[in-house]
Image: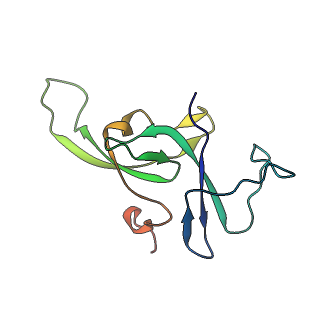
Amino acid sequence: MRELKFRVWFEVERHMDYDPCIDTGDTLVNENFVPHFGEVWMQYTGLKDSKGKEIYEGDLVRIKRPLWDWGPDGAPMVEHLVEIKWVEETCGFRDAAAVTDGEVVGNTYENPDMLGGAS
């Protein structure tokens, strides 16, 4: 069983909190949890990258994949940037298995420019 951990992006302050306080009194973090305005909660995937860094939703992971999957071995390797996202249809994180050989290089909130977004 993976460790249940979260981090929170505070949009107004433009700050990531890796150790958020979760009120377990009247407020529970579950499927009905509604964050406050400007908060984005991201869950730990239970995976670590090739350097041992924890991978969370919203992380950007640089991976290398062969240019093609068919034909003879020795296909050239190409770098890809993968954004870790939860996929409702599959109840899992997209590309999760592939990223453990990669390296976390940022996240979509602190590094939007890496995906071509505004900084």
Q: Is residue 94 visible?
A: no
- Residue ranking furthest to the right: 26
The type of colouring in the image is rainbow
Residue 76 versus residue 117 in the image, above or below: above
Q: How many marks?
A: 0
Quarter assignment of residue 21: bottom right
Determine whether 45 is above or below 74 in the image: below
Q: Which quadrant is home to the C terminus?
A: bottom left
Give x and y (percent) for residue 33.
77, 50
Image position of 34 with respect to 88: above or below: below
The reply to whether residue 74 is visible in this rendering is: yes
Residue 6, percent across and down? 60, 50
Q: Position of residue 110 (x, y in %)?
A: 47, 67
Q: Relative to the observer, which residue lies in front, 55 or 85? A: 55
Q: Residue at x 55, y 73 (%)?
A: 14
Q: Quadrant of the N terminus?
A: top right
Q: Is residue 50 left or right of residue 5?
A: left
* Quarter of the view holding residue 71: top left
106 lies left or right of 18:
left
Q: Residue at x 14, y 25 (%)?
A: 73
Q: Position of residue 54 (x, y in %)?
A: 45, 45
Q: Which of the two residues, 4 or 30, is positioned nearer the viewer here?
A: 4
Q: Residue 75 is drawn in which quadrant? A: top left
Please give left or right for residue 55 compared with residue 18 in the image.
left
The residue lying at 22 percent from left, 36 percent from top is 66
